[in-house]
Every structure is written in C-alpha cells, then in structure tokens.
Amino acid sequence: MPRVFSVNNFDGGLDVRKTVLTAPGGTLRQLENAFVNSGGEIEKRMAFATVATFDMTTVPPPYVFGQAGAIHVFGVGTAPVVTNINCPVPIISHALVGGPEQINELIDCEAFDGKFYVSGVGASGTTYNWYDGALVKEVDGSYSHGTFARAYKSKMYRIDGKYLRFSGVNNPAVNDPSSTANPGAGFINMSINDPDGENLQAMEVYYNDMAVAARLLTQIWSLDPDPSNDTISQMLRIGTIAPKSMIQFGTGDVLFLSDSGVRSLKAMNINLAAAVSYVGSAIDPLLIAAILANPTAAGEARAVIQPIQGRYWLHLNGTIYVLSYYPAANITAWCTFIPDPGYSDLLEMIIAYQYVFTFDARGNLKLYGGADGKTYDSCTVTIITPHMHASGPTENKRISAVDVMCQGAWSIEIGMLPNNTNAYELVANVQDNTFGIQNIPFAGYGTHIGLRLINQAAGPALLAAVHLNLQEGFTKGGPS
C-alpha cells in the first residue's frame, strides 16, 4: 500500500555514535557548511570574507584579539602593519616593549580596565607577561611568567605551570603581597590538592566560582580579592587539552575540549556542585580521531560563542565544529564548517560586537558574513542522513517519487543498498521546492533509504524536508 515517508526532523544534527544503519531519526551522518536553525531546518552558512591583511613576516607574528567594538593587534618592538582594510570595526595596532630575549610567539591576551595583559614565549621557551605594553615583574625584579590570564573580581589571575598567580586589586602589574595600595597579590600551588594539577591549562568563571583546569583535572575555586578567603569546593576528574577551548556557554555553563571530546560543567543540584555533561558526545568519534591524528593541533583548538545565535564554535585543525542549542525547541545539533578548504592554518577566532572573525597564518582577517552581515559564497554544503528503514528494517520498499521543500539549488541523491552505504544515485537537480510541479520519479528498491543532498551554488540555501512516496514490498523470508 502506498504511503509517504517524510524526512523533516534534523533536531539531532550531526551524530556518529551509532552505525549508519541504526542511527536514530533526526540525526545526520554529515552536515557540512550548514547548521540547524532554531526552527529545526538546515540553513547554509555564510561566507568568510577577507576584511584586512596583516604582515606575518615579523618575529613574533601579530597576535589578534577582539575586545568590545574593536580588533586589537599586538607586536613586540613595533606595531603590526595592517593593509587592505574593509572592516566594520576599528583595527588598533599595539607595540609591546622588547623582552630580555627574542620573543617568538604571543599566546594570550586579556583586557583589564581598557588596557591589555599579554602573554608570550621567548626563544628559550620562557614565558613573559606585559600589561599596558610594559613587561610585568615580580617583587624581586624578575620577570613574571604565565601562559593564560583571566580578569576576575578586580584582579588578574594567570596560570604558570602548577601555580595560579594573582595580582593586587585594581592593578595587574602589582605582584607584591605586602602592597597597601593594591593588596591581594599572591599564588596558589594547585598541585598540593592533587598531583594532576601540576600542569595547569586554563580557567573560566563558573557561576560564582572559577574553574581551573589541567589536562586530567578541574578544580572549582571560590576566589576573593582577599586571598585568605580563597577556598576549593570541588575537584573533577576531567580537564582540557586546549586552553583556548574553555569558554562560558549559555547561563553559566562552561564548555571545553578534553581528550574524550567537548565536555561541559553544569549545575546539577541546588548547591551548584559541578558535574561533567556529555554535550559533545554526538561527535566524540570525530573529535577523538582528530585529536589522536594531530595532538599538537588539538592543543591549539580555539572556541568562541557566536553573539547573535549563541552558537559554540570550536576550531580544530581546519574544521569548525558548531553547536546549535535551543532547549525550548529540543534542538541540540552539531555541524561542521570548512572555512578555508585546503588550509588548516587558522590561528584565532575573534569576537567584536556581534561579529565573528577568523585570523590565519597567511595574515588574513576574515569576517563571517562579510561586512554587510549577509554575504554568501559557493562553498559545498553536504547533508547525509543515516540509511533509514522507515519503520520496517526487514521490509523492502520501492520509491516511486520524491518531493523536496528547499530553497536554492540542490542535487538530490538516494542510496538503497544497505551493504554499500556509500553508493548513491542522482535523482534530480532542483531549484527551490517541488510542490508546485510534477513529482520527481525514482525507481529505487531496498530495505533502507539514505539521502545525500549537495548545494554548491552562490547565495543562501535551506533544506526543510524531503518526502518520499513509498510502495511497500515484502518482508524478507516470506510474502507480505
């Protein structure tokens, strides 16, 4: 008896935990260069358009940071040179004073009261810190060290190996615990609480506390301007491998990249005790494979929160993994963006106002959506569903016709060979929805149905539903 089988639920997004023949409805095997929007439909991403070019021949190369409504770029000795500017926000160049040795790389930046706290690495591997362009020193006149800084409760906190160091109140350059003008400086040896805390990576504000993460451990601390009030409340046996992946998400949660994939800290009870939530489990196999294939690139992963839609973006070795999370609509959907096919040299992702920028090792500053916020390119959008059995895994079906609810130009392919799930047959190339024209005929036959849809045209595109007219056949082993 004929019936219509509709594929119109994409709420689960990219999910590769199960096999292609057993994955649940609403999930996808591939969702590249498109995302699930708040209505549960698939929408093509916008373009990454170049809005400025930086001179990358300097040592160290420029470090780019977004703060409020501007892009700030830092160099050592001289201010970086920027050309070909077509950017909707100001680009401001800063020169840091030279260090005691050649500075090979700037690795971190944090804003504090309109000024900037910058971390860098010298030729010997020693780290240095600058505040307001000047090198920061300790009480004994030695140079301050640290790899990651975070402003919190009127002080600057920085990670230095096993130590969490902090400045005096209101002045990140003051490290004298006896200062009366700027009291509160000091440090905490995180390794005395647990040996896995010896090599700290990152920290992020978690509700009223600070989550301080090593690779295999996260300590939850209540930090106060008066260090005598600092207390540890919890230790979690998981941490981060990528300092720049740790970021606040939603209303208090913290996401980060661990050895097992993207994880989050969530308030699980009235006492706000932290627990680990597996928000990224749908793409664990992809991330674990990428981490094992290139551990160095994994340690350099970056994350931002897209301001307008609130999506979590994680860049790892040339791919941006994007989480669309709309709890009111029951949507938790991952996808992937390939911002620059053929290159994996993205260095930073930057937020300024409502804009998302990327910065690569070739000196290109690119703006997602372009200067007008609605620029598209002809990137390849690929959507692949599981091979679905349409409520009858052992029943053969025949597809007689196909209809599509879409916008833009799409190629529609169908695969019906459960023993060769990579084989697809082109059904049609369509432009916008097909409801106002005759059905698209197709003569497929098999127990499972897989869809592959591709868009390569310039401009926006959307996929809402695919409807298949089925003629049911017989159950294997006997007549229907």
Image (cartoon, rainbow, N blue to C red):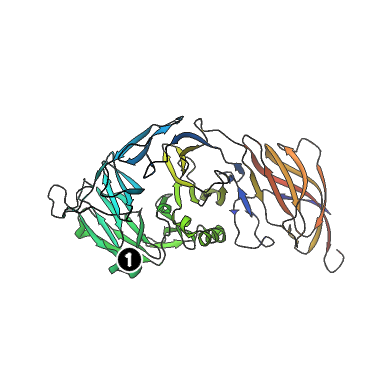
Q: Residue at x 13, y 47 (%)?
A: 181
Residue at 28 percent across and 51 percent down: it is 128
Residue 271's spot in the image, x, y percent?
A: 35, 61
Which of these two is toward me, 453 or 249?
A: 453
Q: Which residue is mark 1?
A: 198
Q: Is residue 375 above or below residue 417?
A: above
Q: Residue at x 57, y 50 (%)?
A: 335
Q: Please provide percent x and percent y for residue 326.
A: 52, 48
Name the quadrant containing residue 480: bottom right
Furthest residue in direction right, as rendered: 479
Seen in the picture, residue 353 relative to 254 is either above or below; the reply is above
x and y percent of residue 252 in the render?
Answer: 39, 52
Q: Quadrant of residue 160?
A: bottom left
Residue 107 seen in the figure: no
x, y percentage for residue 65? 38, 42
Front residue of 101/305: it is: 101
Between 279 and 370, the one lying in front of the other is: 370
Q: Which quadrant would the N terminus be assigned to in this image?
A: bottom right
* Mark 1: amino acid: Glu
Please determine whether, in this image, residue 352 is positioned above or below residue 448: above
Find numbered disc 1 in the image and state the secondary structure of the residue it sits on: loop
Whether 388 is drawn above or below 193: the answer is above
**Label 1: few (<14), some (14–19) or many (≥20) C-alpha neighbours in 10 Å:** some
Visible residue check, residue 370 = yes
Residue occupying the point 19% across, 60% down: 228
Total marks placed: 1
